[in-house]
Image (spheres, rainbow, N blue to C red):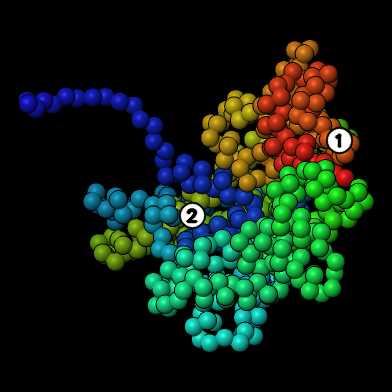
Amino acid sequence: MALSQSLQQSLQQRMSPQQIQLMKLLQVPTANLEERIKEELEENPALELSDENDSDDLSLDVKDEFETPEDEFEELDGSEDEYENIDVSEYVSDSDDDIAEYKMRDDNYPEIDDKKVIPIKNETTFFDLLASQLNMLDVNEQQYKIAEQIVGSLDDDGYLRRETTSIVDDLAFRQNIITTEEEVEDIIKLIQQFEPTGIAARNLQECLLLQLNKKQDEGNDVTLALKVITKHFDDFIKKHYLKMQQYLGLNDDEIKQVINQIIKLNPKPGGEAGESNQKETYVIPDFFIVNNNGDLELTLNSRNAPELRISEDYKDLMREYDRGSKNDKRQKEAVQFIKQKIDGAKWFIDMIKQRQETLTHTMAAIMNHQRNFFLTGDDTEMKPMILKDIAEKTDLDISTVSRVANSKFVQTEFGTYRLKFFFSESLTTDSGEEVSTTEVKKILSDLIAAEDKRKPLADEDLTELLNEKGYNIARRTVAKYRELLNLPIARLRREL
């Protein structure tokens, strides 16, 4: 087979390092921006906060959050660019271009080894609670290690999802403990006596049975409830109450009493304790929108616009080295380092400013498109809006708009919303008008909220009611929207 050579010409679009850094910064929500800036301040000594900021306590929201910032950045007096007029060609040879060129932080800076201590609420966690009960078991050393392995295998809801054989294998391979399935099962039964009751169950049925058995041991009459969970569990979870009532020979009041006993049990015994193991999270809005007598006013959270500047010390060093010897190798290396850090600081300040402008520009387009909603707070006033609509209005790329919309929040007088909330597809009514699917979901939710829970509306009924209101929508679409709203099917919404 003969070999041949050929030339091909192709066009490829590549992002510059600055563009990549801007894209990354756009994705960072306000809540995490402070930490990102702290990292940059630690890694680049040429970058610093303005004097009016407390260097010991990096609080970037130095202005009132509801005050529109007219000039978020320090006014330049011309001295910031003085170092650019210094001729560094004598310091940097052609072979050193790759050294002098500033590399972005992800490639250029080493990992920070300092451990940052984040204060969190001092609470007893779910696993702490179980560990304290483990210490009270009357078992030998091997049994204690088996119990530890079982507790470590529980999920956040308190369930034991792993097979007994898998636990036996884990103990053998990881801890060199040889045991049997029977011994592991015996330890599981011990742990199932822990609080909260229902811990270490393999499934919901076992979890409920553990709780009912304990109630019975305490003298409560739960005989019928035990019978329901033991023999009619499938009918119970599918809410086939009439079938259960006929099997058990109960009247309406008696079946209601049995069902109430069961639904008061905890299906996630580790849930509440597990939640205490997580730090509380608070939504920090990226934008604020205020209705001022019919005029919508948009403000960017001032945390997005910290007052950063290039270090005066570094600029002085650059001037000092310029007056020094041009042939000194150490001088040359120092100039390369200083210029690299100053370039990095300038680029980072510019990226923060571009981030601020892009966020404001994008949010203003969203606000104007959804003006009626921001004036009324009524979901039915939402207009169809997709990423392409905002991209066209802002002359930004769709991917840029998507990065702005992700993980960002806006605070209004009606509540705080994710920006994703304002994006929705369109649906055509019988009159030919295009409406947002958010409007349809709101009406669907209202119909279900107002239904008779003893005879809940099936998807076919909901489809008919929406069609009567002029919304041309199919039953499968109604089912899709209902699922997106986390609303179960009619049978599971039925109440006695």
Point 75% across, 29% down: residue = 459
* Quadrant placement of the C terminus: top right
Image coordinates of residue 162 in percent, x first then y, are: 53, 62
Q: Quadrant of residue 238?
A: top right
Point 62% across, 40% down: residue = 405
Q: Residue furthest top?
A: 431
Image coordinates of residue 461 in percent, x first then y, are: 80, 26
**Amino acid marked by disc 2:** Ala
C-alpha span from label 1 to label 2? 66 Å
- Taking the image as shown, residue 468 lies to the left or right of residue 140, namely right
Q: In the drawing, what numbered circle is on residue 345? A: 2
The local crowd at label 2, few if under 14, some if 14 to 19, many if 20 or more residues have their Cα within 10 Å, is many
Point 88% across, 55% down: residue = 257
Q: Compared to 186, does 330 lie above or below?
A: above
Image coordinates of residue 236 in percent, x first then y, are: 75, 49
Image coordinates of residue 166 in percent, x first then y, are: 46, 65
Q: Compared to 422, does 97 lie above or below?
A: below
Q: In the drawing, what numbered circle is on residue 455? A: 1
Q: Quadrant of residue 120?
A: bottom right
Q: Compared to 156, does 300 lie above or below?
A: above
